[in-house]
Amino acid sequence: MPKIVINRERCKGCERCNDACPQKILAMSKEMNAKGYTFAKVKDESRCIGCRLCAITCPDVAIEVFIDGTQYEFFAY
Ligand code: SF4
Ligand code: SF4
């Protein structure tokens, strides 16, 4: 099963990943990070299909997708 890791401190709450996810399993937390933004979270990881659209869409590279232990990186900041 794919594993989604969201770095809450990088997130700026833009919700683009929520819109991009074809499974609609991402949502925004009611909590805030240190910058005062609500951050993205995974609602139901068991339904993730590992498409990586969330990670590709995130402008702040806050999402990493691991599939079978392999980390998919799109940008090396
Ligand atoms: S990898 Fe695809 S299905 Fe999984 S959370 Fe990201 S956008 Fe949604
Ligand atoms: S696209 Fe990135 S910055 Fe925007 S809400 Fe999702 S994780 Fe946060």
Image (cartoon, rainbow, N blue to C red):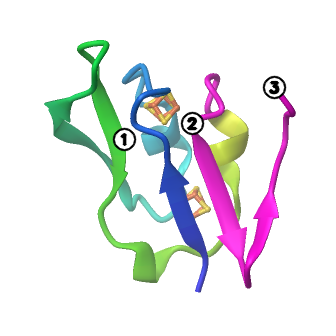
Q: Residues within 10 Å of mark 3 (few under 14, many from 20)?
A: few
Is residue 6 found inside the magenta-colored segment of the image? no
Decide if residue 30 is in sight here. yes
Residue position marked by numbered label 1 in the rendering = 40
Dot 2 or dot 1: first in sequence order is: 1
Residue at image point 23% right, 14% down: 36
Report if the CB atoms under discs 2 and 1 are less than 8 Å apart. yes
* Mark 2 close to ligand 2, CB under 8 Å: yes
- Left or right, residue 46 beside residue 60: left
Q: Nearer the viewer, residue 20 or 1?
A: 1
Which label's residue is closer to the chain start, 3 or 1? Answer: 1
Identify the image quadrant of residue 63: top right
The answer to whether 14 is drawn above or below residue 39 in the figure is above
Q: Which residues are magenta?
A: 58-77
Marks 2 and 3: which is nearer the front? 3
Residue 56 place in picture, x, y as percent:
73, 41
Residue 60, given in percent of the width and then of the height, sits at 61, 24
Query: Label 1 is placed on what type of residue?
Result: Ala
Determine if residue 54 is in view: no
Considering every residue shown, the one lying at the far front of the view is: 34
Query: Is the N terminus in the top left, top right, bottom left or bottom right quadrant?
Result: bottom right
Front tag of 2 and 1:
2
Give the quadrant of the C terminus: top right
Alpha carbon separation for disc pair 2 and 3: 11 Å
